[in-house]
Amino acid sequence: MSCTEGRSNLVENDQERTVTMRVDRPTEDDWQRVRSIRLRALADAPDAFARTFAEEAAFAEADWRKRLSSGSTTFIAVEDDADVGMVTGAGRRDNPGTAGLYGMWVAPGNRRNGVALGLVRAVVDWARSNGFSEVALHVADQNSAAIQLYEQMGFAPTGGISTLPPPREHITEHERSLSLGETICDATIA
């Protein structure tokens, strides 16, 4: 696999500026923070996730704490002290050697500036350090920006297809994966 040339700066009005971001790894005591960003994600992009805003808004504190202590790992992107993105990595039950990348979301005003790249890298690094040989994800077929990002980072289609659960079963997804023997590529973000 060859990498597509990329850069890590945002180009805005023909002027380049560096974007500074950190990635936090919340604990179950951060459940309110995780709840807040997850509900923002579900409100912003309802057709990108298996669960709905209404389902997760009804979760109790115990549900959020369990989500953060169940063996999965959540990462939150932070820019200028604001939570601007989120993703979760977890082992897949159907394939023990594969980690899943789940619930990827970046706030609309922070897209295309490296936040998604940083979040995917966090999951890939976590998966490598936990002995997984592959990271797999599902992406909606109509989400061309996400497909382009994953493709440029080296995630290849596996042939697996699915749909979201009712009432959004009309939304089709396909699976992509990255072998952790490969070098993760920087994506073009400008």
Image (tube, rainbow, N blue to C red):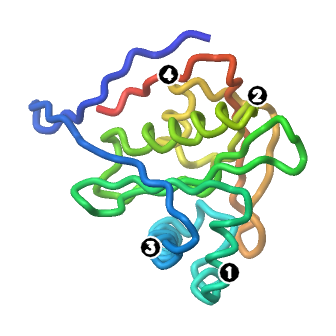
Q: Which of 8 and 65 is in front in this view?
A: 65
The residue lying at 57 percent from left, 79 percent from top is 53
Residue 133 is tagged as 2
Q: Do the residues labelled 3 and 4 touch (CB within 8 Å)?
A: no
**Outermost residue toward the top in this view:** 2
**Depth order, front residue of 179/167:** 179
| Residue denoted by label 1 | 63
Which quarter of the figure is the N terminus placed in? top right
Q: What secondary structure is marked by label 4? A: loop
Residue 160, how many percent across, how many down? 82, 39
Q: Residue at x 50, y 62 (%)?
A: 26
Give the vertical position of 152 relative to 4 (above or below): below
Q: Mark 4 or mark 2: which comes first in sequence? A: 2
Quadrant for residue 155, please give it: top right
Neighbourhood count class around disc 3 (C-alpha, 10 Å): few under 14, some 14–19, many 20 upward: some
Hey, what amino acid is under mark 1?
Asp
Q: What residue type is labelled 2?
A: Ser
